[in-house]
Amino acid sequence: MGKIAFVFSGQGAQKPGMGLSLYESAPAAREVFDRLEALRPGLKELCFHGEAEELGITKNTQPALFAVELAAAAALRAAGVEPAMDAGFSLGEITALTDSGAADAETGFRLVCRRAELMQADAEANPGGMAAVLKLTDEQVEAVCAGIEGAYPVNYNCPGQVSVACKKESLPELSAAVKAAGGRAVPLKVSGGFHSPYMANAAKAFGEAVRAETLREPALPLYSDYTALPYEGNFAELLSRQICNPVRWQSLVKNMIAAGADTFVELGPGKTLCGLINKIDPAVRTLHVEDAESLLETVKEAGVC
């Protein structure tokens, strides 16, 4: 029998109203939201009733998504669905760190808040943007970036999709170069050039923040975006390098499958990671939890009831 992997959404998945249905229907989710609300009053209002523009500000986006993701995981665990391994995309890796038992909810939340502040500061100091490049190979995307000053391939998402970070003013040039190569560039809902050298200061400072916290060995395999492999205790190094280096999502998912995962449950708004995973390996099953309805459906599909 295969294993269940929990995977946690990244920035860009946020949307107004996220988490409200879980809060109203799942006691375990409610407990998570209430614990985090005590640390950052107004968090629930931001998640449940915040406008898209407010949710799109990095210092708001990351803590809000963390809360929704951790609440979804708590609700799913309370319903009897347990993961055999954890991973998260970008900020989702902090939620995965917490779900794995390496950090408690309060520590994980402090870390994600600090990460968000640092990344927003770097984004403001180095205005940048990101686009998902479709229909080109990794090598073609790398060649396009090599021809544009300050452009970097940063997220290797799935076959035929690589995200690129660049200067904000270079986005039109990037789009034209991608089109000329036979691909398509889709702008992303982010406020900076994440996972690139534009985030070098944030990466360094976040490493110091991680080292100041007490973390434990995870209770289950926890996969790193930076290496695409399970952690081996080097939390500060991996979490800081992840901020200014590419996310190796395609390799990470393949490694989880090789370790026995055949069911992936995305925790957080939307089904972006489910779509990427289906393109990486159509043979695996993907489920998701973002609200009361999807929670019930996933519990049913997982065979718990």
Image (cartoon, grey):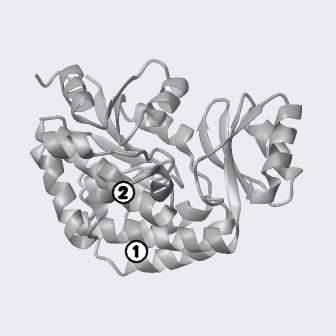
What residue do we see at 84% from left, 44% from top? 144
Q: Is residue 79 left or right of residue 112?
A: left
What residue do we see at 48% from left, 75% from top? 207
| Distance (Cα) linking label 2 and label 1 | 20 Å
Residue 231 visible in the snapshot = no
Can you tell which mark lies on residue 168? none
Q: Amino acid at mark 1?
A: Val
Q: Residues within 10 Å of mark 1 (few under 14, many from 20)?
A: many
Q: Position of residue 206 (x, y in %)?
A: 48, 74
Q: Position of residue 171 (x, y in %)?
A: 78, 50
What residue do we see at 15% from left, 43% from top? 24
Can you tell which mark lies on residue 64? 2
What residue do we see at 67% from left, 30% from top? 160
Q: Residues within 10 Å of mark 2 (few under 14, many from 20)?
A: many
In which quadrant will I find the N terminus? top left
The answer to which of 35 and 228 lies nearer the viewer is 35
Q: Is residue 73 left or right of residue 244?
A: left
The answer to which of 171 and 42 lies nearer the viewer is 42
- Residue at label 1? 210
Q: Position of residue 254 (x, y in %)?
A: 49, 34
Q: Amino acid at mark 2?
A: Ala
